[in-house]
Amino acid sequence: MNQRSLWIEGLSDAMGFLGGALLGFWAGHLLGLDIFSPGYGNSTIGAILLVGLGGGLGLQLARRWRATLAQKRDESQ
């Protein structure tokens, strides 16, 4: 791997994770779950779970997107 591909990999992973985590946060907010409420009640745990799931799904989507781009690039060569 060259320097540029590592840079693209890191940026796409970060953007996928952050985007997914933000979507999870806003989904929890729309459902009335508050990640910043004091203590660890059910509402807080549910919101933390949604942020974690969203981040993980966003990361997986970014990796699949990169794999698809690599496959298309290999097929065109």
Image (cartoon, rainbow, N blue to C red):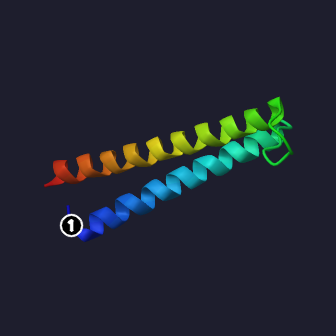
Q: Which amino acid does label 1 sit on?
A: Asn
Q: Is residue 42 above or below residue 62?
A: above
Q: Which residue lies furthest to the bottom in this view?
A: 3
Image x and y of residue 68, in percent: 32, 45
* Crowd rating for badge 1 (residues with CA inside 10 Å; few <14, some 14–19, many 20+): few
Residue at 35% from the left image edge and 51% from the top image edge: 66
Left/right of residue 19 with respect to residue 39 in the rendered view = left
Residue tagged by mark 1? 2
Please identify the quadrant where the N terminus is shown: bottom left
Location of residue 2 in the rendering, given as x and y in whole percent from the top left corner:
21, 66
Q: In this view, does 58 lie to the left or right of 29?
A: left
Estimate the x, y position of residue 39 in percent, counting from the top left. Answer: 84, 40
Which residue reaches farthest top? Answer: 42
User: Farthest left residue?
Assistant: 77
Q: Image check: 21 left or right of 32?
A: left
* Mark 1, secondary structure of its residue: loop
Look at 13% across and 55% down and name the residue there.
77
Looking at the picture, tell me which residue is in the foreground, 47 or 74.
47
Taking the spot 83% from the left edge, 33% from the top edge, the residue there is: 41
Given residues 36 and 20, the one toward you in this image is 36
Q: Which residue is drawn at 74% across and 34% down?
A: 45
71 lies left or right of 16: left
Q: Position of residue 60 (x, y in %)?
A: 45, 41
